[in-house]
Structure formats: C-alpha cells, structure tokens
Amino acid sequence: MANVQQKTLTCFCYWGGKRTVNSNCTFSYDGGFSKAVLLKEGLKLFELIEKICAALKTTVGEKQFFYNTNRDKTKCLLLDDEDTVAMMFHCNEDEVDLFVEEPPRSNDDLTAVFPSTRESLLADNTVVASNNVMEMTNSHTKEMGMIPYLPEDVNEILSGKGQLFDSPDIFKQALMIFAASNKFSFKYLDNSKAYYRVVCKVEGCPWKLTATCDGGGDVVRVIGMKNEHIHNASDGSSYKATISSKQVGLFFKNKIVQKPSFLPRDICNEFENAFQYRMSYKQGWRAKEQAKECISGPPSSCFHLLPWMCRRLEDAIPGTRAVWTSDEGKFKQLFVSYGCSIAGFKYCRPVLKLDACFLTGYYRGHCLSASAHDADDGLYPLAYAIVSSENDDDWLWFLQNLKEVIGERRVVLVTDRNTSLLNGIIKVFGGDCNAWCLRHLKENFSRFASSKGFKNERRKAALKIVDQIAYARTENIFNFHMGRLRGMDPDLAKWVEDNNPNHWSNAYFPYKRWDKMYTNLAECYNNWILPLRDLDIMQFMTGHVTKLTDMLVRKRAASCSWKLPVGPQIEKEIKEHQLVARKYMHRPTSPTEFTVLNTHQKQFAVKFDQRTCSCLAWQMSGVPCAHACRAIQNSGFSIYDMVDPMMCKSTQILIYENSMSPVPLHDMPPLSSFDPSNLSSYITDEGMTCTDPVINPPSTKRGSGRPKKRRIESQTQERDTVNCSRCREPGHNRSTCKAPIPG
C-alpha cells in the first residue's frame, strides 16, 4: 500500500493585537505581531501549542487558539482537541491564519480574582502585572514612593534608554515586576549604587539593561536596554522568578500595618495570584520581616523611642505609670499601667492574676502581666512589663512597680508558683497574700501520683479529693478529705501537707479569695496579646493601647445595655445554683433567716441581712449559694439584691467609666532620621529633647532553629517520670530493668 503524503500548512500566527472583520468579508489585525510557522499534518494538540508559543516567544499559560478557513476568513474556529487539529488541516489547502488570545473573563471571575490579588496589593501601594496590564493608583505610589507613574502596558515599566527612577529601590522593584510579568529571570553582572548591568539568565538570550546613578545621587537613569528574548519551550517550562524579599515586602507593607497577623503563606498566595508564580514559605517569611522593618525601622532602633513613648503615655493618659530601665546603655525593663486601668481597678475585687508569656519577636524576652476580674468575671488588664526573662530581678522590679500602682490596698495574688515570682511577692507584699493556682498544683500532684503507681481511675479519684481539699470551707471538712486521701496512700497525704495548703486551700487561706482558684484569666490575657507578641517593642506598646481602647469602649457599651442588675456570667452562675437548689427543703425561722435541708438531710442556716450561709460558700464567692437560692424562693426578696455589690451592673459601669484617652503619635520622631551621635539635631517640634539617652537593644543570644510560638504553661512542673512496665518502679524502663524476674 502506497504511503499517503502528509499535508503541510503555512501557519500565520497572530498574538497581542486585536482582530477586526472588514465590510468586504476580510479581516485585519491591529497591534501585536505575527510569525509564520510550518505545520505538518499529524501534530498533537500540545505539540502544536508548544511550537506556536515558542515562535511567538510567549509562555503557554492559559491561552485560546482559533483558526479560519479558506471558505470564510471572517469566522474563527476553536482549537481545543485532536479532532479540531485534524479538521484545520482538512479545511485548508496551503495556508491558515491562527490567532492566539487570552481567555475572556466573566464578571464573576473578575470579582472572585481581583479583590484577593490586585485590589489587595494595590491597597498596599504595589504594582501588579496581570494579562500584560499594569494597574496602580498615583495616590498610593506617591505615599509609598514606588514607581511614580501609571503605565498602560507592562512593558512601559521599563521603557528603555533615558528612563529615570527616583531611587535604586524603585528601579529594582520595577525590574523585578517587569521580569515577573514577562516570565523571565535575570541576574546582575554589576550591582552597585553607581552602575547596574542586568542580563537574562537564559544562555544566549540578548536581553540586557544598563543603568547608572547620575552625579552620585539616588536618581537612577537607564542608559541602555535591549528588550528582546530568544527562549525555547524548555526555557519557558523551567522559568524561575527572580525575587527580592525586600521588594516583595514593600508590596505588602500597608496590609501588614492594618493586619499584623498577615501570614507569610498569605503573602505567597497573593503573590502567586498576581504573578502566577509560587514563592516558597521561606521567601514569604523573609518578605514579611522586610516589610516589618520598612514599617518600623530596624528592630535595633526601636528602643531609641522608648523614653519618648513613655512620656507621651503619661502626658496623654492622666495617672499612667510608664517607666523603663537600662543597663550600660542597653534596654533592660519596661513597666506600663494606664491611668484608666488604675482608676477602674479600685472598683474591682482585690484579686490579681500574675503570669508571664514568651515574646517571639526579634529580641524575644518575656511579657509579665497583672490582670483582674471585672464585675462579670471578665478580663481587666491592669499592668504589663517587658523584660528579658522570668528571673528574680525582673519579677521583683515588676512587683515593686505594681505595688506603686495598687497603693495600700490589700490584694490577693494568684500565681503559678514560679520560684522567682514567689520570692518577689514575699519581699514586696508579704507571703500570706499569695494564692497558688490549683491547676498547676494538680498537675504536679498528678505526676507524683503516677510515680507511686496510681494510674487512670485511681489517679482521677485522688485528683478529685485534692479538688475537695482545695474548696473545703472549714478545717473539719479539710481534715475529712485529708483522711480519705490518707486512706488511699499516706504518701499522697504527706505530699499535700508538704505543699503548703495555707496557700491554696480555702480552709486555711487568710483572705477572701472570691473562689478564684485558677490563673485562667492570665492565660486569657496571654491569648489576648497574641497578635502583639512577635512585634517590636514600639509596635507592642502602640498595639496594646489600641487593643485596650477597643476593649474598654466595647465593654462599657455592653454593660450599659445589660437588662439585669448582674452580668451574663453571674446570671449563669446563679441559675446553676438554683438548679441544684430544687432538691432542697427550707423553712423560715424569721423574715430574714431560714433553715435549709439538703438531699443528705444536713441542715444549713441562711441569713439575708448578713448575706451569710453556714456552708460559707456565699461569703467566699459573693454569689448566693444553692442553700441561699432555695431560701430566697417565695421569700419576697430579689436574688439580685443578695449578690455582692462588686459583682453588679452599677460596679461594672464604674469600672469602665474611665475610658482610654487618645494617644497622639503624629509627631513621633522617625527612626530613619535618628542619629544617636547628634541628639542636639532634634528640635522640640519633633517630640524628642536632647536629654533623652541612647537606648540600645538588649543583649540576646538567639537559639538555633525556629523560635517557639507555643507557651510552656507550667514553669514549675517536674519532668515526666518514666515507670517500668515490668517491675512498676519509677526511674527506668523495661529494657534497662535489673529487678529479678518474679516467680
């Protein structure tokens, strides 16, 4: 059988312009450029596409391919599978016109894509290239100082010889955007402030650009540019963008200002949507770090503004205490307590939760905090400090400043038994006001019980008894539960006796603790400042002011809208007590005194005029206990009148009556102009006087690896005890067990 000769077509390819149909049934192609290619019959669709794109020097990407026929040049047929390729050869004899176009986008597609890519980047004063069009606002570029013109086409970013750029940064950003938009990589042969020589990374590609800084200044002038590429399909498929973390960081500067929690992976995703190139997470992380440095200056310079910021807080918010210390010119400690917080704390219950959390910024450190409960058991921040670590000196300094804020008022300090913190409390407040967190104590007890062989249900039963010991109201109840624990194991009871029950059991604690047995409120504070913990010290201070202002305004509005005399949390607690009280019986002995019998037929005395119950729960918590709730029913008294006044709506309004005064920061001295060697160059209008000392960053030794983000909740926990599964003894495992095999 004779071989059938393959047909060859001369394909005239058109790209980058606009096709119009004339009145004489012909077509014309305006703009763009064309290329002639020979196509042999039998080509696969992907082979045809790669050959055409290589001839037109463009990437494959998302493009559509149309052809016309000799019969009718005004109609275009879509190439989208192998059959349409075969039909193109069948319908044409010697030549064919082929048009390469971008796929059309619907309004829904534009709405879905642009807000997450273009508009978000344009809001950050950036230049975004998509479909060979650059869109940008002059107002944003003037504010940002990046590429101060509005090109209609991506190629106009680098128009050629004679083009001027205001600074090397603007020039480098324009170069990076131009390359990313045209999908080619470049490298610097010369990269100095005086001279730039850039070429395409593809071997043999003629594209090159040269620029120089005129007169040794910052203005960069392009002195030569050859905008021509010779790339094959392999070069296009192996394209890798030339990315500068500094320039990418500038894209997202304003977004990070508005949303400090903007993540590196968010930067990667939005950059990919804008330029169709996926950055690595490490590149996104570096870009965010560069943006943060662009926003607030180098981290080492932020400490210079600390005296100015402390003065500004004290001037703007009356009664504020903002103090700092340094050691040999290096930052050491910062303490801040706002005047509005101090004024509101006078109406709060005298219980403070003290704790510390890690800071994850460049210089790390710790944030020490003191938080109180408002009238609805919500978080009420009183003071914070930024220090190097939880050592004796830092905790003592924090507590001394806290004492100045509190004055002579007697308070209960709930802590997690940190050794340095306990030592400081004894020196400043005395040891009897220190209440230990029950959760941390139970964690340590649980480990001790495990080392004694208590597992699963037995260990849970022992922990339940420890709970009852902690909440015991009287010595008799305390001794009763201690006897139960001693019956389980004498060592467990001895552990409780050795761990100072007078600091954590209600039966022996000398002050009213309001049943606040845990430091959960301090954990809430640590979570509240979570977005600030990786910022520098100036951003932390300004961000803390903003967050506290929002909290005070929000809670003040919420308290005024309460429909009941108490808040939602206190109301919930009262309802729980009422639910338990349904099973109780009561009888009056006078109009204000009642006898209540519980389900075990135990008798309790309730007195309304004194707001007391013989179980002592009402006195210790401030909320009517279940016995009091049963007595109040059908008595004619309002249960809300029996709640302690410090937990009522009127007190909540007084707590949040003093709102945060606005802190003006418009005249904050710019770090870029700060010259430690010439402080006299500052004038008073810039907000800094000549008496401000130079504060350098603290001496911090950064550990290897990625900084820890998750806080270690208990600083005094013992290490996990290994128990042998063979002999049940602690301190070793089965493989190293030397005990004799049991017979």
Image (tube, rainbow, N blue to C red):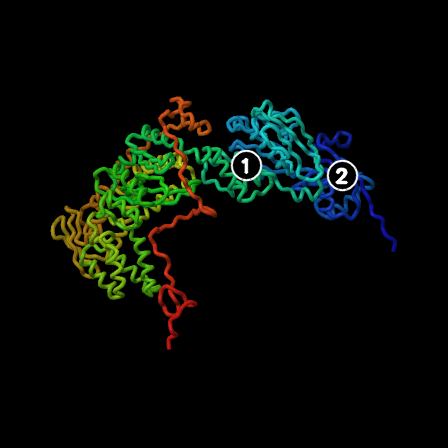
* Outermost residue, bottom side: 743
Q: Quadrant of the N terminus?
A: bottom right
Q: Quadrant of residue 645?
A: top left
Where residue 88 sits: x, y (%)? Answer: 77, 43
- Compared to residue 737, the image places residue 664 above or below, namely above
Q: Which mark is residue 248?
A: 1
CA separation, marks 2 and 1? 44 Å
Q: Are marks 2 and 1 in contact (CB under 8 Å)?
A: no
Badge 2 local density, few (<14 within 10 Å), some, or many (20+)? some
Examine the rendering and report whether any part of residue 650 can be seen: no
Crowd around label 1: few <14 · some 14–19 · many ≥20 (10 Å): many
- Left or right, 195 with respect to 456, comes to right
> In the figure, is residue 562 to the left or right of 221?
left
Q: Quadrant of the C terminus?
A: bottom left
Residue 325: x, y in percent? Answer: 33, 35
Q: Is residue 270 visible?
A: yes
* Residue 453 falls in image quadrant: bottom left
Determine which residue is flagged by label 2.
68
Position of 46 with respect to 323 (left or right) is right
For the point 34% across and 45% down, which residue is it?
390
**Residue in front for this viewpoint, 36 or 295:** 295
Amino acid tagged 1? Val
Marks 2 and 1, the one that precedes in the sequence: 2
Amino acid carrying label 2: it is Asn
Which label sits in the foreground, 2 or 1? 1
Give SS at disc 1.
helix
Residue that protrudes farthest toward the left in the picture: 590
Residue 13: x and y in percent read 75, 37
Picture residue at 61% right of the left edge, 40% below the top:
241
> How many numbered tags mark residues here?
2
- Give SS at disc 2: loop
